[in-house]
Amino acid sequence: MNAQCCRRVAMDLGVYQLRHFSISFLSSLLGTDNSSLRLDSSSSGASVVAIDNKIEQAMDLVKSHLMYAVREEVEVLKEQIKELIEKNSQLEQENTLLKTLASPEQLAQFQAQLQTGSPPSSQSQGTTQQPAQPASQGSGPSA
């Protein structure tokens, strides 16, 4: 009998502490005063409804903040995609121009280097870049 009484007191104390923590947490989220959220043990039905309402308000607040953050991130990502598409288009145009200016020997050497996976040597870079440099400099400011 005494053990059951102790368990009940401990359980009541645990429930009280959980309610107190919930009220403190919710009041900090909602920016309200703790005293306006105090619970009476005699009005447990009304207090449960009040707690449920406060929890719902807090969840709505969190949801709206998350949605705002996601919308912001989507806008940033859309802008990055737009910039990358523009840069890709510019690089494709430059690549096409360089292919038209390169000699067949330079293209063959480049294809061979791609197949072997070796980086271009400084001598071959100098020969492939010399004709392309004036063209890329001329097209740079216009882009």
Image (cartoon, rainbow, N blue to C red):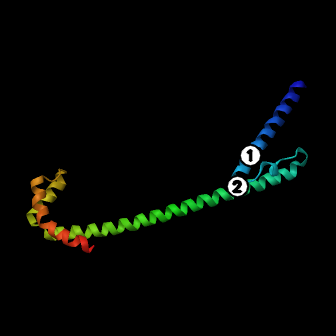
Q: At label 2, which amino acid type do we have?
A: Ala
Q: Quadrant of the N terminus?
A: top right
Q: At label 1, which amino acid type do we have?
A: Ser
Does 10 appear above or below 64? above
Please give the count of numbered marks on the rendered protein. Answer: 2
Q: Which residue is mark 1?
A: 24
Classed neighbour count for the residue bearing mark 2: other residues with Cα under 10 Å, few (<14), some (14–19), many (≥20):
some
Depth check, front residue: 27 or 58 = 27
SS state under label 2: helix
- Spatial distance from mark 1 to mark 2, Cα to Cα? 12 Å
Q: Quadrant of the C terminus?
A: bottom left
Depth check, front residue: 35 or 12 = 35
Residue 124 picture location, percent across and down: 10, 56
Quadrant assignment, res 14:
top right
Residue at screen point 76% across, 47% down: 23
Residue at screen point 76% across, 41% down: 18
| Mark drawn on residue 58 | 2
Residue that protrudes farthest toward the top in the picture:
2
Residue 64 picture location, percent across and down: 63, 61
Depth check, front residue: 135 or 55 = 135
